[in-house]
Amino acid sequence: MILSKYPFLVQKEIFHNMKYSELFMLSFVSKNMKKLIKLSQEKRFKSIGSVRYDYDGADEIRVHVYYGDVKEMITKTEKHNEAKSVRKSFQLNVSGKMIDFRFLRPRSRYVHPIASYQQPSEKETAIQSIHNYLFDFYGDSVEYNWLTTASEWLGRSSIPTLPQIQNLSFCVDINLFPETNYAEMERLENFFSSSPVLKSVRMVAVTNQSFPSKSKLYQAESVEIRQEEIIDTCILRDFQGRQAFLRCGEVSTSVLVEFLNRWKSGEAFKKLEYLKVIMDPISPGDRIFNGIVLSYIDATKQPPIHTLPKVFNWQYYTKSNTDPITSHTYVVREADNRVASILVQEKAFSFGVWNKTEEEFLKMVE
């Protein structure tokens, strides 16, 4: 079949019924073919939620496209294996870099191509070339996220390093078990120190070990932390990011009071947009707010609803929003008159910052 002989609408329909991995390979036929695919699939590409690089901390990097509730692997990289080299392989020019590719055995239901590299030093070059190609192919409306799971490499002799690649954000999933020791925590801290500022960190901590207050962990844009006992108070003292989702067995009322006072004075949490702490039943709101100057919306009026797009969504492939906050209670930051809504429930403390002054905020009240 010669695609160039068909009208554009027919070509568009053919491309629309192809998988992303198939379009990826077809785009290497020629520069004109790549342009034609981009032009005809522009709307489809904009529906992509994200491109994600799943890294096992060793040799393999799997590249997925996420759209709707579906994920599709479009390619993966792995270290060259001589035993597999007997299978048919071919070279492609990927953003100026010649990379060896091969397919899995014939008749396999997996059709994604596999890129290989010879030396560990070539791994970052290969993935950077693939990323540059995908960024040009899908465009800048798509999120590009690199995800690594610490439990896959924590017990190894060396920790992985994250590549220095533009237009790529980094997310780390961590499980800290009761047997996690000081040496492993130190290795994790070295990983944070040597990495770019992370987009998101998800951590389950069933341990008494904690990170130092100056840890680069607290610079992440978003954190999701579950701790069985008392939450690590550093996150409510030293967090410098935008969104925090915390779940724990217990949190001291005094820690929440300190958090509110430091935000209100402008001393800390200047980038914070949203905080939610889920815990065991907490003190009534009047005890938490003791000594804090609060403002209130008239009880007969409907307060505005605070919600934001999540920085990163670990649960689903599509983008999602923070849980809505509807509250008559708010606090005003002294430095710039910005407003934050506060909601205290039986097992949750929610805090949402508005990008509005108090005057602008009150105009939204119904």
Image (cartoon, helix red, strand yellow):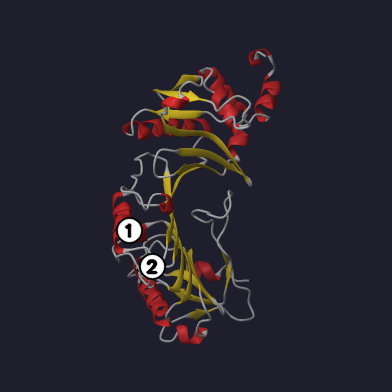
Q: Secondary structure at mark 1?
A: helix
| Between 170 and 150, the one nearer to me in the picture | 150
Q: Nearer the viewer, mark 1 or mark 2?
A: 1
**Kind of residue at badge 2:** Ile
- Across and down, in percent, residue 196 comes to 34, 48
Q: Earlier in the sequence, mark 1 or mark 2?
A: 1
Residue displayed at 57% across by 58% down: 321
- Across and down, in percent, residue 100 comes to 44, 23
Mark 1: give few (<14), some (14-19) or many (20+) Cα within 10 Å.
Answer: some
Query: In whole angstroms, how far apart are the C-alphas of marks 1 and 2?
Result: 20 Å
Q: Horizontally, is 338 left or right of 185 in the view?
A: right
Are discs 1 and 2 less than 8 Å apart at CB?
A: no
Q: Horizontally, is 247 left or right of 128 in the view?
A: right
**Kind of residue at badge 1:** Glu
Quarter of image, res 220: bottom left
Q: Horizontally, is 290 left or right of 197 in the view?
A: right
| Between 240 and 57, the one nearer to me in the picture | 57
Residue displayed at 70% across by 26% down: 13
Residue labelled with disc 2: 235
| Between 284 and 114, the one nearer to me in the picture | 114
Quadrant of image for the C terminus: bottom right
| Residue 35 visible in this rendered orientation of the protein | no
- Across and down, in percent, residue 172 comes to 42, 52
Question: In this picture, is 142 found above or below 213?
Answer: above
| Residue 151 visible in this rendered orientation of the protein | yes
Residue labelled with disc 1: 184
Question: In this picture, is 103 found above or below 53?
Answer: above
Q: Secondary structure at mark 2?
A: helix
- Across and down, in percent, residue 207 comes to 40, 68
